[in-house]
Amino acid sequence: MSVTPPLTTVRLRVNGREYAQEVPPRLLLSDFLRYRLGLTGTHVGCEHGVCGACTVQLDGEPIRSCLMLAIQADGADVTTVEGLAPGLDRLHPVQEAFRLEHALQCGFCTPGFLMTVTAFLREHPNASDEEIRRELAGHLCRCTGYQNIVRAVRRASLMLTGDSARATPGAAGDAPSAP
Amino acid sequence: MIGARIPRNEDPRLLRGLGCFVDDVNPAGVLHAVCYRSPHAHARLRGIDVSRARAVPGVHLVVTAAELGELNQPGPLLIPHPALTQPRTQRPLAVDEVRYVGETVAFVVADDRYVAEDAAGLIVADYEPLPVVIDAERALATGAPLVHGDVPSNRAARFSQRVGNPDQAFQQAAHVLRERLVIERSCGSPIEGRGVVAEYDPRSGVLRVWTSTQAPLPIKNGLARMFGLPEFQVEVIAPDVGGGFGTKIMLFYPEEVLVPWAAMRLGRPVKWTEDRREHLTAANQERGQIHDVELAVDGDGRILALRDHFIHDGGAYTPYGMVVPIITACQLPGPYRLRNYAVEFEVSYTNKVAVSPYRGAGRPHGAFVMERMIGLVAHTLGLEPAEVRRRNFIQVDEFPWDVGLTFQDGGPTRYDSGNYPAGLEMALERAGFATFRARQAEARHQGRCLGIGIGCYVEGTGIGPYEGAHVRVEPSGRVLVATGLTTQGQGHYTTFAQIVAEALGCDASEVTVITGDTRRFNWGAGTYASRALVTSGNAVHIAAQEVRTKALRIAARLLEASPADLELADGRVRVKGVPGRDLTLGALATVADPIRYAYSKEAADAALRLVKPRSGAVLADGEAPGLEAFGYYAPPQATFASGCHVAIVEVDPGTGEVTLLRYVVQHDCGTIVNPTIVEGQILGGVAQGIGGALYEKIVYDEAGQPLTTTYMDFLMPTAMEIPEIEIVHLETPSPLNPLGIKGVGEAGAIPGPAVLAEAIEDALRPLGVSIREMPLSPNRIRELIERAERSTT
Amino acid sequence: MKPPAFEYVAVASTEEAVAQLAAHGDDARLLAGGQSLMPILNMRLATPGRLVDLNRVRTLSYIVERAGGVAIGAMTRQRTVERSEFVAAAVPLLAEALPWVGHTAIRNRGTIGGSLAHADPAAELPAVAVCLDARLTLRGPAGERTLAAREFFRGYLTTALAPTELLAEVWFPSALPGTGAAWIEFARRYGDYALVGVAAVVTLEGSTVRRASLAVTGVDGVPVRAVDAERLLIGAPLSAESMAAAAESVRRTLEPQDDIHATAAYRRHLAGILTVRALTRAGDRARLA
């Protein structure tokens, strides 16, 4: 027979806004964000930490929200995909780069990618393609084959470092250097 | 607009996290459901005790077969066929026997998923384990345990097709080559699993269901039937769908029946969201086949005849009929001249989850078999595999080419257009084939194993029955498009908008496309078999053309010009060469709807005309108000896309690891509406093809227990495993539809196993390794190397 | 896949943690980074009555130099250790193995102690600990005790930790002069647990191998320290022949199991190949050190 432990108040900031709610200990952070706060942009794909769809930023660092209890986020600063765009009329440069490079198809895995990529580019503003792919390996996408996501990250890094002249689109089919 | 690489209309919303997937749908008071599933692959269900589950606080309902009553019928046989003599479908809840691990036995509805899982954990069922059969071939053998007690030899179907005179051709052949080729089970595994939300409003009598499906219209009609409701009182919505890949074309999964039933029973909305373990055990799977194939060739490597017998693993039930093996049989000939062909398949029941299409839907198997045999011919005769292909291609002047078989849609397997020889040359050129053999030889000197593989295929796309579209221009100038089929990421919100924008001379961003909502469009089948752009695309085109014609007619009258002197551009109709003499589409839409009330300036102009003296009705005989049209497109038969992939690999003979050095795709899907979106489809398909060749395999143990139930065990490739893919386009428009388009949704996934099998075999040729199975792990490659070593010592 | 119900307490000190374990014993589980435990709970493969959350215990998170090595508090995040230049210089094997542990998001929460205490037989950190003869400090109601890594790992997902003990710290010796280390791993996908992983440390004096450590993960319930192979290497130059002999010894020592990802024979075979690769790289680095 299951235990019914007492509810505890969790206080945290999500996308810059303060929240306080009573939660049972076992409520996952992913479910807290989606159901208690109505922030359904964070998606759930596996609940064992592999697919990355549930990735949010905790105090700026990407983490799997399906592997954290909501109660553990007490006092934390959480950023979800809903907190990326600076306004209703503008997208974050990483979002814009994804849009321009067709780096999403069904869009289900996308928020997780965005939360990893925005943090990654902060720490590695001039990452190589190999470094980009290593970082992206923590996220599963079934639609895109990853290629356009790599291009989007590359493009976003150029946009963020102000190198707009080089941040130009390219079609799939451009030949890579011969192996 | 058609042919333009524009960014997608749907992206800003999705990028902001404003997508609405099934689990994001939360009607007020929604309850959460969990399925209690069989832990046994085969067992008699002697009894079930749900009393402790019912007693858990927060549980609203626990139902077993006994309580489900009349609703608990075996599901519909979705695609019957005369050769499917022993079809069996699954009941929503098992009555007295379970036939695969994961089969639904009870349904729990509670305040939240956590409590529902607590309750499900307290259900106690009395199972008497029965013998299990897992291997599709052993299932057909005498004495095998029976999955269904009344289906002899577990044989659901046996179907033969024949073209020409294969037996005679075999007798006259210079060479007869035989192989046994095996493809193992896999699954679609979209990142969003399945899910269903239902609510019933007794005040309106409307049952509304959101389901992550590829075909809401048949579900609507089926649910209406099942629940005794008029169709117009059932609404089925496929909201944003996080990938389908065929897994979600299966209709009336048990949960799609149980959730609406529970919602109606409880008078509360109910939601069921699949978790990953459920998906990898209870969502339909595909890909398992065993082929015994013989090929007869002449001394020059020209194919004279082919005979194939294969066993198709159907799983425990056959709700989707035998569509997948039929497609295998019909698509196996590929782009080659095959005048004498005999193919027979048997569908066997096994104690595993049922099989229904997964991207490729039988074509990957066919391509694997044919391409392996091509490779065998090449090796036997000492020819380049590319040369064997050249000698056997259907030539450009031989279209239409009738394979001689009936395709999955009942129509002929008749290739309408294509250019296979040019496609091969494009792919080889792009892959640098001209210098490859020299590089390969040099690498061999250094002890490195490089190999090149080719995979050609033909894909029947755009089958019927039909699709429809509704196009309407609003007074604001915004255009609404609705169609019955769905979207799972293919960009319909953009490509259909481009087709309309082309017809109406407006911008694609001004066009809002709605798909998969039965409230908005009542007719159509669904998104499957690479058909959406061909069928709905052409229907959208037809409807948009009709709107265009009406707009020109109204404008001609108002601008006092003849329609021939008018053009559509920038959202306006204007007189050619006379700047300023134009009307917006929105104004024309306003004028076309004479409703008397002036709610805007444009409406005022129209309303004024109504109060002036006139004679006759405001709507002519047979004329409808507004700028609106419905269009339908029923293709005469499939339209055949094609492609050729070339891959260069390096195999580490010590570890068996395969590194993809280069991967080139040449494809032909006819006229291209949005090249970026087409390429995206190919890239995603190729990733699944590579996954299916080197990583993904569904494994069951001898007791029928699934062993690949998490993403740690079912291995989907990441960005580190999928290389840069290069795409070259060839366009042979389809002569069969107005837009000249062919489907491309499955293309990328079709030849993956074929091309990589050839490349790996080519790399390991000096070691004498033959590749006859898919998928291949480094472990397995290493075993094949060791086996080849032992056989030469 | 939602966790079963449990009581939950977030302790603020190791004393509190130990007191909780003493009171609840087998029925309590320690929650560190959660990257191993949460999937287990989500899949309901374990149903502890109480979770004792260590994430508020600040005193368990540190990286300090001590006694010719580096002491790392058990709750130090893997990512923190990965980013530490000090660790990269002092314990290069650890720094090299860490990026192979899952992915960034996993390492942002996962802890050094958590990975060691979980003792997955295909994990990287246990093999590193065994290779370097790390020393692990356990704390319980009776006080503290320190074990060598080889004594700590007992079997499949089993360590020397009593139900009332927690892992408080792991100490790694700093690399000696003339030492080179290498971590080589073979996994099906980047970031997965290793099918086989080999940690090699070689200390050269001139061209002679003075010390050699070889540990293999993925081939047994615990990381295997290939002492016979090490003996073959010590006292002689590091050559293709000696490495081949070491590899053969490693292959003979191992008794892996079949599973759906690899056969026993393949794991054994891989272990030999990776041994040579790891020794080669470690030797190259030793010559430069």
Image (cartoon, grey):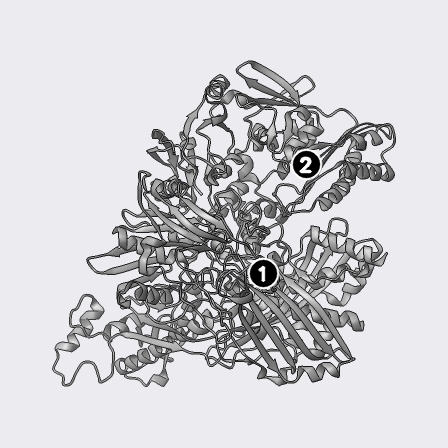
Element carrying mark 1: loop
Rendering coords of residue C158 (x, y %): 60, 30
Q: Is residue B495 rendered to the left or right of residue A178? A: left
Rendering coords of residue C36 (x, y %): 54, 36
* Position of C137 relative to B658 (above/below): above
Rendering coords of residue B551 (x, y %): 31, 78
Can I make out residue B513 in this image? no
Q: Which mark is residue C220?
A: 2
What is the crowding at mark 2: few (fewer than 14 residues within 10 Å), some, or many (at least 20)? some
- Pick the front one: B263 or B26: B263
In which quadrant of the rendered view does residue C236 lie?
top right
* Position of C49 relative to B519 (above/below): above
Q: Quadrant of the C terminus of chain B?
A: bottom right
Q: Amino acid at mark 2?
A: Asp
Q: Which mark is residue B144?
A: 1
Q: Residue at x 82, y 53 (%)?
A: B447
